[in-house]
Amino acid sequence: MTIMTAGIVVLSIVLLDQVTKYYIITNTSFPVIFNYGIGLGLFSEQKYFTIFTSFLLIFVLIIFYLKKNENSSIKKTVLVLFLAGGICNLVDRVKFAGAVVDFIPFFSLTTFNIADVAIFAGVILLIYEFTVRNLL
């Protein structure tokens, strides 16, 4: 995946995430959760820590992407999906005083957003890359 393609994918995911959140927030019939924590609500009382950590992880993902010289498009796609999800959540954290907007219910277990879908898709691809693909 070229840098241009990666940028277009990241921008597309960020735009989709932000447009859906804007629509959900302005439409009162949808339940919205402002999640101040990271996975499973961890660090919910530490706004600046989560914002700083988001910046740091985005920086690391960009460095990994630029330094990856291998031809594995799956690994580069994983990095792009993680980067897009991280940027989406960082935009929320800056915009909503440390919170991320969640609005897609997953049974009664949790609620998530487009950024979480991108990150989850990256995790699935990573599992595929290190298990199924290595077995073939």
Image (cartoon, rainbow, N blue to C red):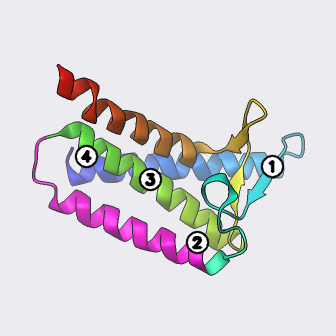
Question: What label does residue 50 carry, if any?
Answer: 2
Magenta residues, start to end? 49-71
Going by the numbered disc 2, the residue's amino acid type is Thr
Of the image marks 3 and 1, the number of the one nearer the N terminus: 1
As displayed, is residue 33 above or below residue 55? Answer: above
Residue under label 1 = 32
Q: Is residue 91 magenta?
A: no
> In the image, what residue occupies the spot 70% across and 65% down?
99
Residue under label 3 = 84
Query: Between marks 2 and 4, how big is the CA–CA gap?
Result: 25 Å
Dot 4: element: helix
Going by the numbered disc 1, the residue's amino acid type is Val
Of the image marks 2 and 4, the number of the one nearer the N terminus: 2
Quarter of the rendering occupied by the N terminus: top left
Dot 2: element: helix
Dot 1: element: loop
Query: Between marks 1 and 4, how big is the CA–CA gap?
Result: 32 Å
Residue 40: percent from the left, percent from the top?
66, 52
Of the image marks 1 and 2, the number of the one nearer the N terminus: 1
Query: Between marks 3 and 1, how big is the CA–CA gap?
Result: 21 Å
Callout 1: 10 Å neighbours few (<14), some, many (20+)? some
Residue that sits furthest to the bottom in the current view: 48
Going by the numbered disc 4, the residue's amino acid type is Lys
Query: Between marks 1 and 2, how big is the CA–CA gap?
Result: 20 Å
Callout 2: 10 Å neighbours few (<14), some, many (20+)? many
Contact (CB < 8 A) between labels 3 and 1?
Answer: no
Q: Is residue 52 magenta?
A: yes
Contact (CB < 8 A) between labels 1 and 2?
Answer: no
